[in-house]
Amino acid sequence: MSKIKEKNLKKLKRKSFWPSILLFLTFMAVSVVVIFAGINLFTTYIIGVKLTSLHDQAMETGILMERSIQQGEKITYAVSNVERYRRDPSDVYVTDEQGNWVMSTGSSEPLFDQSFEWTLGERCKVYKDSAWDYGQGALDDIESIFELHVPALAHRAFHQAPDLRGSEAKRARWMQEPIIEQQFWMYVPVSLNGKKLYVKCTLQIIRQDVIYIMILGAIALVLLFVPLLFLFINTILNIRMQHRVTKLLYMDPVTGGNNWLYFQGYAAKVLGSGWNSRKTYAIVDLHMERYTNYLSCYGSKQGEELLECMDGFLRARMKRKEVFGHYGKADFGLILQCEGANEEACRQNCYRRLRSLLAELAGLQPERKLHFHAGVCMVLPVNATEGSWYEKRKNVDIDQLFSFANTAQASGHNEAEQIFFFSDRLLEEQSWEQWVESNMQSALAAGEFQVYLQPKYTPTGGRLVGAEALVRWICPEKGMIPPGRFIPLFEENGFIMKLDDYMLSQIAKLQAEWKVQGKKTVPISVNISRAHFTQEGLAEHISQLVDSYGPKHKLIELEVTESAFFDDKDVLVNTVKQLRAYDFPISMDDFGAGYSSLNTLKDIPLDVLKLDAEFFRGEDETGRGAIIVREAICLARELNMRVVAEGIEQKEQVDFLAGLGCDMIQGFYFAKPMPVAEFEARMAADA
Ligand code: C2E
Ligand code: MG
Ligand code: MG
């Protein structure tokens, strides 16, 4: 489910988020390129126009000199003539055919080894000026450069604007101020009696040019701004939508805080990060007890408000890099950072922190006390986890770690302690439970559950007068598994009904076979789990099952544990009465263990009382145990019940019970539970 949601979020990002960002960025890049290309083109155009004009001026100078020489003047006179007549005077440099200096004006000269060619309609050759320095015309000394060198167009405009006055003239001068100025020499192809002519030119970019360029840039910017703005707004809206969808995806509908998906993702990121690999964390299952009761009492709205309140409380208690999320019903998952010098110190810190958290949570509603439990799964630094059951950090499975915390939390129900740490023992139990669950059906079908019989003897004379059927799981893989390891699990998962039916049918079959074979028969008791009493029509069911093999009902005694009498007393009393009406003897198993059942004896007519083995464990120095056993036997006698003492291992116990008139003894003193064949042999010997 969570994977699908994340996939959808990624799809959404791909479809709406990234395309709009990309479009915006592309358009922005294109706009920048267009603006720069436009400015570049315009600048090139302006420079082109200026160069053409400079070229024309140089040619004009050349032609003036050519004419002057043709009129018979010498080169020096030609130069002065040019200086007199030409409109735009500039320095000239004259060489002979071999390039030797003949004459020049001005202080600089062309650098003949540094030339390049420009094409301005026709190709023209250009030489660097010996005083070449890009940026020489910085604004500070622009005036002096103009005076020292050749006044150019702009300079003229600057000094010779007779019709411009006042502020208008000031503005015009300001506009004509050069920003960039560069001098170079241009070769002028005219015929000067075998001499070569070079004219010095000054290229100026004036403020007006720059302003034109800036205006062009601004127009382009304005034209591009509208679509850019539209795209920008669109992108922002997309980001906001994306944000909202993410929030919805990670928001818990009940608490309004983080949901489980968020918790999983964040916790995996924290634990999987290399930076955090040396830190110890705790994954916690915080569980509110009896939440269903709370809902029944105060309604679901109040219940949800309580969870919302818990969410707010936890939010305020989380530190940096810690997070929590609502798991479901009244469970929250937390990831806490635990500090400490070693594992035990981290554990202690975590314990203390959780204890104060739970104490505060208990008082969340002043008018009623709330109850909480927490299960903790410690996630140790990477080195310490090697070879242990913990997942390596980088492949961390948050669901599994949380299920460990949940197992720890569930293991502690009904106990006064509130915080439970997950351990290898719990893991073993958990994997054992899983193994049992996945193998029980096939084991039943394969006949791996076998009947063992433990004989019951009379204390005086030691005659075999009965037996109890006890199940043994003979597993080819694990050997013999005692009932204590699987009966409680079967009681939880309901499989006990099948097993009890199976045992009952095996005993009914055995009794029927013994009868047919003419062997001695004794009553055999079969354990009926308390879980069975929830089944409707249990008495008829048992009766039919036994009848399908045909033995007398008297030969099959049904043992009900004492705790079963506390489940639903009315149902139990009815069923027991019906079973007795079918002629099945009923015994109360484990009498005296755990709960007091004297009251039960008043309501239900039973046939046998089985004294719990605990009465006979340990030393009875004060003799109080003996008094209780004596009184229990008296009570049973008064109520017309037979008494079986369980767990008898010593001769003195047998003698003591014989003295009290106990009817039967079931214990290792006489015999341990044994396979059917062995029991048959024992019975034959006893007959
Ligand atoms: P239980 O019905 O009270 O059975 C008596 C238990 O005490 C048996 O343990 C038996 O082996 C043990 N025991 C008898 N005498 C002695 C003794 O002198 N010393 C010691 N140390 N132990 C003695 P087991 O066979 O392990 O069975 C344990 C419990 O499992 C049974 O207690 C019963 O509650 C349950 N159980 C066994 N088989 C079945 C079955 O087929 N169905 C159901 N529902 N429960 C069963
Ligand atoms: Mg029993
Ligand atoms: Mg018992």
Image (cartoon, rainbow, N blue to C red):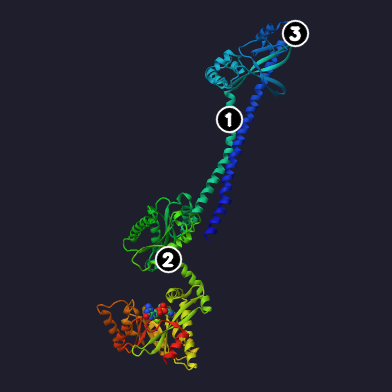
Residue found at x 55% / y 53%: 10
Judge by depth and name the residue closer to the eye, 638 or 217: 638
Mark toward the viewer: 2 or 1: 2
Label for residue 260?
none
Q: Is residue 337 left or right of residue 166?
A: left
Can residue 151 be spotted in the picture?
yes
SS at badge 3: helix
Residue density around tag 2, few if under 14, some if 14–19, many if 20 or more, within 10 Å:
some
Q: Is residue 106 above or below residue 414?
A: above
Cα gap from disc 3 to disc 1, whole angstroms: 49 Å
The residue that label 3 is drawn on is 70
Q: Is residue 468 left or right of residue 40?
A: left
**Going from the N terminus, do you reach mark 2 or mark 1 first?**
1
Kind of residue indicated by mark 3: Gln
**Going from the N terminus, do you reach mark 3 or mark 2 first?**
3
Mark toward the viewer: 3 or 2: 2
Kind of residue indicated by mark 2: Leu
Q: Is residue 616 above or below residue 458?
A: above
SS at badge 1: helix
The residue that label 1 is drawn on is 215
Q: Is residue 628 above or below residue 132?
A: below
The residue that label 2 is drawn on is 426
